[in-house]
Image (cartoon, grey):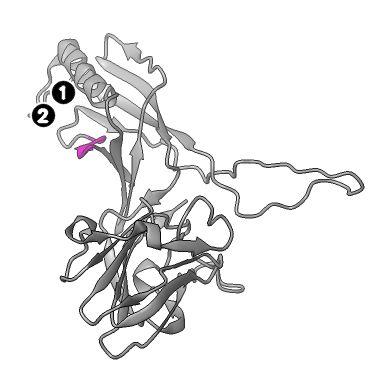
Amino acid sequence: MPSYFLDGVPLTHPAGCWRAKVGTQRRPVPGARAVKVTVPGRHGDLPVVGLDLESTMFGIKVAVYGVTPSGEDGGYEQMEHNLEALGALFGVRHRLMTLKYVAGSIVRVADVTITSAVEPDINVGAAIARFTVPVEVPGVLWRDELPSTWSGSANAADQAVTTLAGSTGPITDALLRLTGPAVNPAVTDVATGLTVFRPGGLLAGERLLIDCGQMRAAKVTTDTWDLDAGSDVTGEVDATGPGSAWRWLHLTPAVAVGDPWSRPVLVASSATSTDTSSKLEIRARRAFL
């Protein structure tokens, strides 16, 4: 059975203090933020692609029992203590909470918040409380728990980023690392045509780090992924393609023709004056709708 963990706390408690019920919803598929453009002399609306996604919300049904953390019967009083413990868990407001979904080998995480009121339905005689927690996912996308690193060529077309295969949503915060020698390095997301590049050259041993999520870049001379360890070159990096005015590279899975189970992420990279030590690396977590 699938299970949820909020900030590391299982929502099906191992001692039976509470459990997420069977009626808990699966995360919904997000909708697009609608944009309608009409012009005189044309029927309907102009087609608009590349729309951003709306935040999602779903409910987790929880039953709370009068069981102590050690598994003993504590009656109604213990049920109240368990409700207070869950209230503290759900009541965090100064930061986003981490919700983990686990179903066998499938693990997905998302930053969530709980802002709606929760009103328990209490059975006093049985010392049981039931309620539904409305969970909001402001960032829409669910992610792998840990990032992975892929290594490819600094000068090749249509490279499959194997570590990101299977994603269903765009990966907006990838960290790119280009190792020199390389002149005028550029990386393109094949699905969308978005390209990020830096005019100029990298010497052998130099690395260009590009943080697509924070839209920052740095040049470093050591084997590191830390942008703060080098010199800032954010102002030297540019982007082209759809939406490039307000974002850098979004790595987007492309469904293979007739095969929705095949969802590769393809990138193309280009540079001149490269040699065998030149390469492109991508560190990121997969994203899921």
Asked if residue 27 is positioned above or below residue 113 in the image, the reply reads below
Res 95 → quadrant: top left
Callout 1 secondary element: loop
Callout 2 secondary element: loop
Amino acid type assigned to the residue bearing label 2 in the image: Gly
**Residue depicted at 30% across the width and 34% down the height:** 96
Contact, mark 1 vs mark 2 (Cβ under 8 Å)? yes
Q: Marks 1/2: CA distance? A: 6 Å
Which span is picked out in magenta?
A: 7-12
* Residue 11 falls within the magenta-colored stretch: yes
Res 91 → quadrant: top left
- Judging depth in this view, the residue of 120 and 195 nearest the camera is 195
Q: Which residue is mark 2?
A: 71
Residue ranking furthest to the right: 41
Q: Is residue 67 left or right of residue 157?
A: left
Asked if residue 165 is positioned above or below residue 157 in the image, the reply reads above
- Judging depth in this view, the residue of 233 and 228 nearest the camera is 233
Q: Which residue is mark 1?
A: 67
**Residue depicted at 41% across the width and 36% down the height:** 24
